[in-house]
């Protein structure tokens, strides 16, 4: 599978700009630190976070998927990927290529799963 690099859309920048005067810069700083746990790229070798941390597919223990109901473009609102020593986050609506990230993530997790092995997936419906 090819390398997919996450491209943040205007929502992240808009949130940073709105939080800047409202929280005297503290909110923007916290949002920037939270972004370091976002997925930066996904390829056949593993997942790279914005912080620069690289995790192989063998390190993935499970993932939590939150879905929305209704007629929206993307039903998935958030995916938290759980590793042995932390988590990574994908917010599809915050990325221009969020749906592509989800497809590549699911494809690579199926490929990395050992034969006959199961991966724990928690699907949480959101209204």
Image: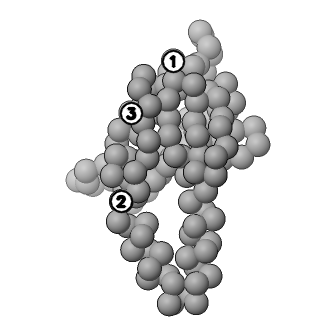
The answer to which image quadrant residue 31 occupies is bottom right
Let me know if residue 89 appears in the view.
no
- Identify residue for label 2: 9
Let me know if residue 79 appears in the view.
yes
Q: Residue at x 69, y 30 (%)?
A: 59
Q: What's the mark number on residue 103? A: 3
User: In the image, residue 36 lies at what x, y percent?
Assistant: 61, 56
Alpha-carbon span between mark 1 and mark 2? 29 Å
**Sequence order check, earlier mark of 2 and 3:** 2
As drawn, the residue found furthest toward the left would be 71
Crowding at dot 3, Cα within 10 Å, few <14 / some 14-19 / many 20+, comes out as few
Asked if labels 3 and 2 touch by Cβ distance under 8 angstroms, the answer is no
In the image, is residue 97 above or below residue 70? above
In the image, is residue 66 above or below residue 43? below
**Sequence order check, earlier mark of 3 and 1:** 3
Asked if labels 1 and 3 touch by Cβ distance under 8 angstroms, the answer is no
Locate the N terminus and report the quarter of the image it occupies. top left
Q: Residue at x 60, y 10 (%)?
A: 116
Q: Secondary structure at mark 1?
A: helix
**Sequence order check, earlier mark of 1 and 2:** 2
Please give left or right for residue 49 compared with residue 18 in the image: right
In the image, is residue 110 above or below residue 74? above
Foreground: disc 2 or disc 3: 2
User: In the image, residue 64 lies at what x, y percent?
Assistant: 56, 43
Q: Secondary structure at mark 2?
A: loop
Of residues 77 and 104, the one nearer the viewer is 104
Q: Residue at x 39, y 74 (%)?
A: 14
Q: What's the mark number on residue 111? A: 1
Count of numbered marks = 3
């Amino acid at each position: 599978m090819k390398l997919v690099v996450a491209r943040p859309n205007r929502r992240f920048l808009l949130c940073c700009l709105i939080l800047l005067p409202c929280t005297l810069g503290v909110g923007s700083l916290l949002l920037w630190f939270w972004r370091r746990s976002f997925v930066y790229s996904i390829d056949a070798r593993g997942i790279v976070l914005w912080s620069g941390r690289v995790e192989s597919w063998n390190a993935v223990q499970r993932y939590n998927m939150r879905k929305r109901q209704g007629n929206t473009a993307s039903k998935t609102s958030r995916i938290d990927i759980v590793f042995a020593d932390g988590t990574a986050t994908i917010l599809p609506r915050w990325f221009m290529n969020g749906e592509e990230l989800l497809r590549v993530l699911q494809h690579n997790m199926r490929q990395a799963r050992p034969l006959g092995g199961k991966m724990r997936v928690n699907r949480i419906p959101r209204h």
